Amino acid sequence: MNEQDISHLTDNELSQSNILIRQYKFFVTICIVVGFIVGTGIFWRPGRVLYESGGDMWAGVMAWIVGGIMVATCVYMFSVLAAKYEKIHGMVDYAEAIVGKKYGYLAGWFFAIMYQTAGYALIAWITATATATFAGHDNVHNTPFVFFVTAFYMITMFVINYFAPKLPMRFNVTTTVARLVPIVLMGTVGIAIARFTGDSSYVEVVRPTVGEGVAAPSFFGAIFATVFAYNGWQAAVAFNSEVRDSKRMFPIALLLGFFIVMVLYVLYFIGVVSAGDPYALMANNQLGTRAAFANIFGHHAGNFIMIFVIISGLGILNMCCMGMSRGLYSLARRNLGPVPHRMVRLDAKTNVPRFSMVTCVCVSFAWLVVIYGNRNGWFGQLGGRQFMFDLADFYNMIFFVLLIPIFAGFLIRNWRDVGIHWFNRIVAPLLAIGAAGFMIFSLIISSPMHAVIYFGAFLVLAFVGGLFYGRWK
C-alpha cells in the first residue's frame, strides 16, 4: 500500500491496517531528534576524544567540529532523502528506493539487528556505570552490580514501551530538558568560572600510557570517537512517516536538532576539560566528569550531576527502545525478515509492533554478552593489549559503509532531475559520500585491525540475515 492509498484513512483505520499513525508535531519532532542524539555519548566520549587528540584541548575541540561537520553533511543528505522518499522506515526506504530491494533489506537488517540493538545494550551499560559512579564504587565498569543494573534498565524500558507507549514520548520530552541541564551549565557557567592556565596541552600524560606495539593516539581517532556522541539522528529518521507534514517539517527538524546539539557539545567539551583534571578525564571519563562539576559547583554538586547523567542515559535508552521496536516491523511490512506475518502485527490497544520489539530486546541481550566479554578478556590480545570489540565503533563504521551506495545511487538517479535543486541532487550527494568515506578512513587509519574485524563481523551477521530473505510467502 503506497502513500496515496493511505492518505484518506483515519487514524483508527490506519491502526487496523497495521500502519503507524502521523501523530508528532514540529516541536515534538525536534525533541525526538535532540532526544535521540543527546544522551550518554557526550558524557562518555570527552575523555577518549582528549586522549586521541594527544591531550590537547583545542585539538579535541577541532575533532568535535570536524566530526560534527562530517556527520552534518550526512544529516543534510538524509533531509533531502526524507523529502523525496517516505514510506515506513527512513533508512530502509532510502536503500530500497535508490539501490534496490535486496540492499534495502540488508540496510534494514543491519539497523534492526546490529545498530539499534547493540546501541540499546551499550547505552544501558554506560548508564549503569554512571549509576555505579553515583553510588561511590571504585570499579564502575565490570562488577555484578553494573551488569545487574544494566539488565534492569533494559527490561524496565522495554516494559514501559510495550505496555504504555504514550508514556515514553512524554518521558522523552521531559528528559530532553533534564539531560540538557548539565551540558548547558558546563558549557556556559563552567567555561566562565574555570581558570585557564594558558597551557591546554597534556601530551606528556598520553605518551607514557601508550605501550610498545600499540598505535599512538591519532587525531583521526578523535574525530571518529565523536561519532558516538553525535549518534541518534539515524534512528530518528525511523519516525519520518509518523510526523505530520513530514516532507516539509521533518528535514527542518532534523537539521535544526542536530546543529543545536553540535554547538552544545563543543561548549560542553571546553567546559569539562577546562574545569576538571584532564588527566583524570582521560584515565576514567566518569570520575573525571564528576570531578569537573565538583570543581565548579561544589562537591555535592559533583555527585548530584551524576543523577542528570543517569536521567540522560535513561532518556536515550527510552528513545532507542522506541526506535528499536520499529526495526523488524519495517522489514515485515515488506514481507521480509523472520516470521513477517508476526513481526508486522500491531497491538490492538497500544499500536506497538510487539513481536518486533520483543525480538529486538532479546538480541540486545546478546550484545550485552559481548560487552561482558570485552570486560573479561574473552577476545584475546591485539597489538600487545586486550582486544575490545567496541560496539559503537562497529556499528558506526558499518553505517557509513552502507551510506555510500545510497548517496551514490541518489546522485546517479537524479543528477538530471530539474525538479530537485542542483545543490541537492549533485553537490550534497558528493559531499555526503566524501564525509562518509572520510569517517571510514579515520577508523582505518587509527585502528586498521579493528576495522577489518568489524567488517568481518558484519559479513557474518549479514549472511545470517540473508537466510531469512524471501523465506516466508
Image: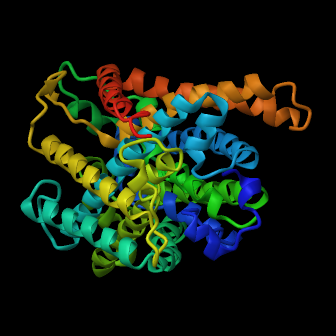
Q: Quadrant of residue 150?
A: bottom left
- Quarter that holds the C terminus: top left
Q: Residue furthest right?
A: 418
**Picture layout, residue 46 above or below residue 268:** above
The residue drawn where x is 37% and y is 37% is 393
Given residues 132 and 450, the one toward you in this image is: 450
Q: Residue furthest front?
A: 473
In the rendered image, is residue 253 in sight? yes
Task: Please name the colour scheme applied to the rendered image.
Answer: rainbow
From the top left corner, tell me how far across and down residue 245 is, in percent: 76, 64
Q: Quadrant of residue 6?
A: bottom right
- Give whichever of 171, 357 is nearer the camera: 357
Asked if residue 68 shows in the view, the reply is no
Instruction: Where is residue 73? Give x, y as percent.
Output: 66, 39
Could you tell me which residue is drawn at 41 percent across and 79 percent down? Answer: 164
Query: Residue 186: x, y in percent?
Result: 47, 67
Q: Is residue 245 left or right of residue 181?
A: right
Residue at 36% from the left image edge and 42% from the top image edge? 114
Is residue 243 shown left or right of residue 387?
right
Count of picture labels:
0
In the image, residue 29 above or below residue 267:
below
Q: Position of residue 29 (x, y in %)?
A: 63, 66
